[in-house]
Amino acid sequence: MADYYDLLGVSRDADADTLKRAYRRLARQYHPDINKDPGAEDRFKEIGRAYEVLSDPQTKARYDQFGEAGLGGAAGMPDMGDMGGFADLFETFFSGFGGAAGGAGARPRRRGPQQGDDLRYDLTIDFNQAVFGQEREIRIPHLETCTTCNGSGAKSGSGPTTCSTCGGVGQVRRATRTPFGNFTQVAECPTCGGSGQVIADPCSACGGQGVIQVRKKLRINIPAGVDTGTRLRVAGEGNAGLRGGPSGDLYVFLTVKSHPSLRRDGLTVLSDVKVSYLQAILGDTIEVETVDGPTSLEIPVGTQPNAVLTLENKGIPKLGNPVARGNQRVTVSVQLPTRLNEEERTLLEQLAGHHSARGVQHHHHNSGLFARLFGQG
Ligand SMILES: [Zn+2]
Ligand SMILES: [Zn+2]
């Protein structure tokens, strides 16, 4: 086995940064995905092993004193020989969905700036607030950059250092023996949580996280014409980014409460109204509910059951163009009486041309008949 310092091409007194740079350069050079030369993979593993040992002050000290023999039985050391450089290679392509990290899956995490998570906030608003829009104050819990350490997570004067468990890669590989063979499992580094860096002297304000959970008061402007399912984006009000990365966005998902008597169909407001059979036959002007408040609606003479009457411009404003409004469509149901008093019966029978024993004696002008009949309605 070659000397670890020779493998990495560094002197015995090289500092941590020099070691790391040398390791990363060589890891890229010999990475099996890139270098197809025979022996490249073995070389890659040796480099990884060398860096693993030399980047940890304790194992480095043992190696310096006793050579390879000093490392025997270093139990618990992760097998990361063939993974160095992996994160680097993918960094460019990986956009860093911070919220997805931490699961069982093995995904490379960026060690550089990382964009903060987008957040979802569910907001329920009243029917009329959705129609006309409203400014609302909400309180959202989100992460903000720690002002004490400016997001570094380290106490002032100190800084993050390369994680010695994973050598700054953020991942470890473990061999698992099963009846079907040996599998290598890639997992997030347990020491640094995948960031590749550890903070020896953490900021006391944020516990080394670089971000703090804050309940922030926000005024959001709900535009006229929104509906259930409308998603409002509030730029930059998601979680703060890590290591100088940009903040995520806040998405407000709206749910609109139903109205006791009005319904929505796109830009159209739908409602029902009941009129008496006399109002339907003779016509009338009645008051109906609209999103603008009570409004007069003319019931034309001879309105049929289930006729649909239109109130122009009483519908929903178009989202983004509130000057354009839909209409309200009112479905008229005609109520027939279930019982008649004596007088009504008499009048209706006369109207029907049916002369009962009593009714036949009366002679009325038609005008008088209508006046008495409909005077009740
Ligand atoms: Zn802090
Ligand atoms: Zn680590």
Image: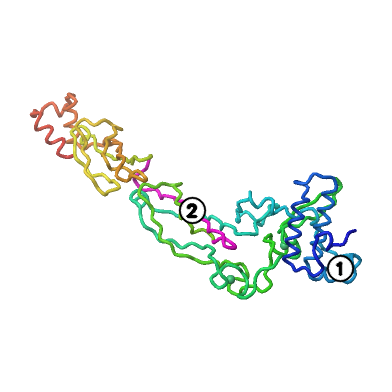
Q: Label 1 is placed on what type of residue?
A: Tyr
Work out whether 284 lies above or below 107.
above
Work out whether 332 lies above or below 167.
above
Looking at the rendering, the stretch of residues picked out in magenta corresponds to: 240-264
Q: Are marks 2 and 1 in contact (CB under 8 Å)?
A: no
Q: Label 2 is placed on what type of residue?
A: Tyr
Few, some or many residues within 10 Å of mark 2 (<14, 14–19, 20+): some
The residue at which mark 2 appears reads as 251
State which tag comes first along the sequence, 2 or 1.
Answer: 1
Spot occupied by residue 337 in the image (x, y as percentages of width and height): 26, 36
Q: Answer left or right for 119 relative to 71.
A: left
Residue placed most toward the observer, 219 or 243: 243
Q: Which mark is residue 187?
A: none
The residue depicted at 84 percent of the width and 56 percent of the height is 46
Residue 374, image quadrant? top left
Q: Does the residue labelled 1 lie within 8 Å of ligand 2?
A: no
- Total of numbered circles in the picture? 2
Element at label 2: strand
Q: Answer left or right for 37 relative to 363.
A: right
Spot occupied by residue 274 in the image (x, y as percentages of width and height): 28, 39
Element at label 1: helix
Q: Does the magenta stretch include residue 250?
A: yes
The residue at which mark 1 appears reads as 63
